[in-house]
Image: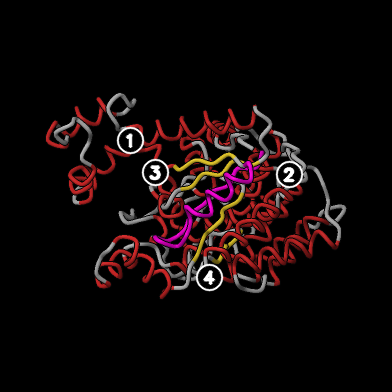
Amino acid sequence: MLRIGLTGGIACGKSRVRRQLAAAGFGTLDLDAVAHEMIAPGGPAYPDVVAAFGRGILAADGTVDRKVLGARVFADAAARAELNALVHPRVRDEEARRAAAHRAAGGRVFVTDAALLVEAGFHLRFDRLVVVDCEGGEQLRRLVARDRIEEAAARARIAAQMPAAEKRRFAHIVLDASGSLEATDLEARRLVDMLLARADPPPHPIPTEAAVQAALHHGPAEGPRGLDPVRFATGVGAAGGMEMEALKRFLVPPFEGPWFAAASEPDGRSAGPEALAVVIGLWALMRRGLDTEFTASAMFTAAYLTHRDDERTAGACLLSLAAARLGAGLRAGEDERRSWTAAAETWARHAVPSWSHAVVDGALRDPPDRAGAREAAHRAGVDPRVADGLLACVTAGLDAPATPAVDEAARALRRGAPLVS
């Protein structure tokens, strides 16, 4: 079953699109509504939330006054984290339960609608992310009319969200809802056809434990902003997936803001996102199979956490796609290579650098050209162990002594790749 994340800016038409998808027979879930259910009287999180925040958050009828609670947590990061810890696991469990029920009933597509999928950093829980977008002037007009507020207040609400152009960068599919209601409904029907065409799962070979261990052992020891491959795998395992707010906690120096604002300009001396490319390619293979778009989007997201270097991101995306293929025990023809390049350049918005092509060429040769791949990386100022990690996917286990840290990281990576499709 294909899992879809549906998101978009305020008053952009996301809820209307969800209703159209439900009418087409897809399973749908409004995640914000589920969160409200969790803290309603009788809901599983209600007693814990009241105990944590006091009866002063309750309205006269005993329900949680969301405005009062919201004011508390908006002004206090610790309180916000406490509320999230009480509510989010229950929301996630309920989402999983409803998705499983839809799959058991023969459903092919399940859609989760939430306003802050990207901002919260859990958009990679889904096989595809759909962003509903709307031209800025039309969005403003709709918000003023819908909420009956002044234009200045509407502008402030829009400005408080992630900019639309930034959110679109994480989308597999962008649905333009700027037109009439009829035009939006037509776009939603086209989306139905697109998603049904992608509903059959891709080939899903699982990399051997030896391949994962070898890639971690031979790959880079350092990573971008302190997020080396072993720490990355450990963090993914602890969070149950590529949860970006959780991975943000590994950055050096620490960053307290939202994950998507953590990136710094590269200084030319530290490791770039390519240091994580092989481990991300293997994680994506375990999570989703040989899915070019999913793998490239995962690598792009990780790069967005640490850097703003489109060229290095493009190179990292190509390497991650090659790692997934080699981790599956497969080679690649010219058509496959071209599709990797196209996907890497689409996500990074930059041409793939020559060094990345050279490293992949060396790994795909028979026998692999380790010296040539390492030299290509070295000449570009890239850690040659990037090439070693990629080649280790081919020569898994031949000379990779087991170490407790690597063994645990390999197990953690598997724990962080639940098969939810």
Q: Amino acid at mark 3?
A: Asp
The percent position of residue 155, horizontal first and vertical second, equals 30, 70
Which sits earlier in the primary sequence, circle 2 or circle 1? Answer: 1
The range drawn in magenta is 1-25
Name which residue lies at 86% across and 52% down: 367
Task: Name the residue that disc number 4 marks.
Answer: 179
Task: Name the residue that disc number 1 marks.
Answer: 85
Secondary element under disc 3, as helix, strand or loop, is helix
Q: In front of the other: label 2 or label 3?
A: 3
Secondary element under disc 1, as helix, strand or loop, is helix
Colour approach in the figure: secondary structure
Q: Amino acid at mark 4?
A: Gly
Which sits earlier in the primary sequence, circle 1 or circle 3? Answer: 3
Task: Name the residue that disc number 3 marks.
Answer: 32
Name which residue lies at 77% across and 55% down: 363
Question: Can you see residue 388?
Answer: no
Secondary element under disc 4, as helix, strand or loop, is loop
Q: Amino acid at mark 1?
A: Ala
Which sits earlier in the primary sequence, circle 4 or circle 1? Answer: 1
Name which residue lies at 30% across and 60% down: 147
Locate the C terminus and report the quarter of the image it occupies. Answer: top right
* Position of residue 118 in the picture relative to residue 275 (left or right): left
Which sits earlier in the primary sequence, circle 2 or circle 3? Answer: 3
- For label 1, count other residues whose C-alpha is less than 10 Å away and answer few (under 14), some (14-19) or many (20+): few
Q: In front of the other: label 2 or label 4?
A: 4
Q: Are marks 3 and 4 in contact (CB under 8 Å)?
A: no
209 over 203 or under it: above or below: above
Task: Name the residue that disc number 2 marks.
Answer: 327
> Cα distance, mark 2 to mark 1?
35 Å
Secondary element under disc 2, as helix, strand or loop, is helix
